[in-house]
């Protein structure tokens, strides 16, 4: 807090400001101006930010100009394309910390006022949300019917970015292994399976190879190099997993189709357009085998990932968030997905 306090001390010494808000702990800050600045810095497009805030572009520029006048620096180089100055990047770092602190104060006060709070914002990928939320949310609302849950359903990279910037309170995805101040509460371990249509399995492997593969409990993903693969698009986690394996083992894979949708990937595999690697959460193994598909568990550990609730270590966790995580740990356990499939 020393850096933040020293940073905002300049606001105090300059005297009263328009829209100044007192927020406790000796912090005095123009949160409106700072919020506008942070949004502009993240978006790098004044027109879009003004539309998001439902204000004129002139009003947005005025908020930023106040900060520039106050500190006697330029925060943006407004020549095309718009860029941040060194001073702007410095202010951005501190502005985020100040706004995060103010946000935590409001959350803690709301938690006290409402006996635990009543709203949660959760980031989760679309395919995972469709499988997990119908199981988790009904159980949660039985315990806390007064609460409101807001889901941000987006690719994992966007979900992580939203978590780091405070736009969601928690994210459900893979256990975090990066040093970004993210804490993970593990729910269960998920496997990624290799699924090969029967016709492709017959065409790509000899009799002895098929017999050997079917006799094994787990096989290496190197096996997939002999099959046409349906791959997810670039910068998706499934694609990155395949590419990481290829680099490590110096193996190349042939792709018959590339898609940005996991639903499309599965549908194309069902039409025998190619083999695929897919999380078990999306598959009914018994049904696949009945339809002639070969389903293989992979021997490499990279194809087994821990699913967790991730949240910022530095951020205050309200009581409602802790209750949600505790319930998620009860609901999601080893074999939960197979149990849901059997029930359906």
Image (cartoon, rainbow, N blue to C red):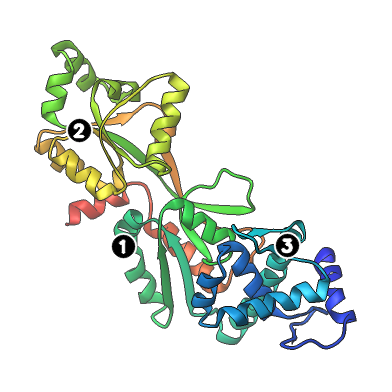
Pointers 2 and 3 in contact (C-beta within 8 Å) = no
Cα distance in 3D space between marks 3 and 1: 45 Å
The reply to whether residue 182 is in sight is: yes
Cα distance in 3D space between marks 2 and 3: 50 Å
Is 233 located above or below residue 228 in the figure?
below
Callout 2: SS: loop
Callout 3: SS: helix
Which of discs 2 and 3 lies nearer the camera? The answer is 3
Snapshot quadrant of residue 178: top right
Q: Left or right: where does residue 187 sit relative to residue 292? A: right
Snapshot quadrant of residue 94: bottom right
Q: Left or right: where does residue 279 sit relative to residue 64? A: left
Q: Which mark is residue 135?
A: 1
Q: Which residue is mark 3?
A: 88
Is 159 located above or below residue 109 in the figure?
above
> Which numbered disc flags the more N-terminal residue, 3 or 1?
3
């Amino acid at each position: 807090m020393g850096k933040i306090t020293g940073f905002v001390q300049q606001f105090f010494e300059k005297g009263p400001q328009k829209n100044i808000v007192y927020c406790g702990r000796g912090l005095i800050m123009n949160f409106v101006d700072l919020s506008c600045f942070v949004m502009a810095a993240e978006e790098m497009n004044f027109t879009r930010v003004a539309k998001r805030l439902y204000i004129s572009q002139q009003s947005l520029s005025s908020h930023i100009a106040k900060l520039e006048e106050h500190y006697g620096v330029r925060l943006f180089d407004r020549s095309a394309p718009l860029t941040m100055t060194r001073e702007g990047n410095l202010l951005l770092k501190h502005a985020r910390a100040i706004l995060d602190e103010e946000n935590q104060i409001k959350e803690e006060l709301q938690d006290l006022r409402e006996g635990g709070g009543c709203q949660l914002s959760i980031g989760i990928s679309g395919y995972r949300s469709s499988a997990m939320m119908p199981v988790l949310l009904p159980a949660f609302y039985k315990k806390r019917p007064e609460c409101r849950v807001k889901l941000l359903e987006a690719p994992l990279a966007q979900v992580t970015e939203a978590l780091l910037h405070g736009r969601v309170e928690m994210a459900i995805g893979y256990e975090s292994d990066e040093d970004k101040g993210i804490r993970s509460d593990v729910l269960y371990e998920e496997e990624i399976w290799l699924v090969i249509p029967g016709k492709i399995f017959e065409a790509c492997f000899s009799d002895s190879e098929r017999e050997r593969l079917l006799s094994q409990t787990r096989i290496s993903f190197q096996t997939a190099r002999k099959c046409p693969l349906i791959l997810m698009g670039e910068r998706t986690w499934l694609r990155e997993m395949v590419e990481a394996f290829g680099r490590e083992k110096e193996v190349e894979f042939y792709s018959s189709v590339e898609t940005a949708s996991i639903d499309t990937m599965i549908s194309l595999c069902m039409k025998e357009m190619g083999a695929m690697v897919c999380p078990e959460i999306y598959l009914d193994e018994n049904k696949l085998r009945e339809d002639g598909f070969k389903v293989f568990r992979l021997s490499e550990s990279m194809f087994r990932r821990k699913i967790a609730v991730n949240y910022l270590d530095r951020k205050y966790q309200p009581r409602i968030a802790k209750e949600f995580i505790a319930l998620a740990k009860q609901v999601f356990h080893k074999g939960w997905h197979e149990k849901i499939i059997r029930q359906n």
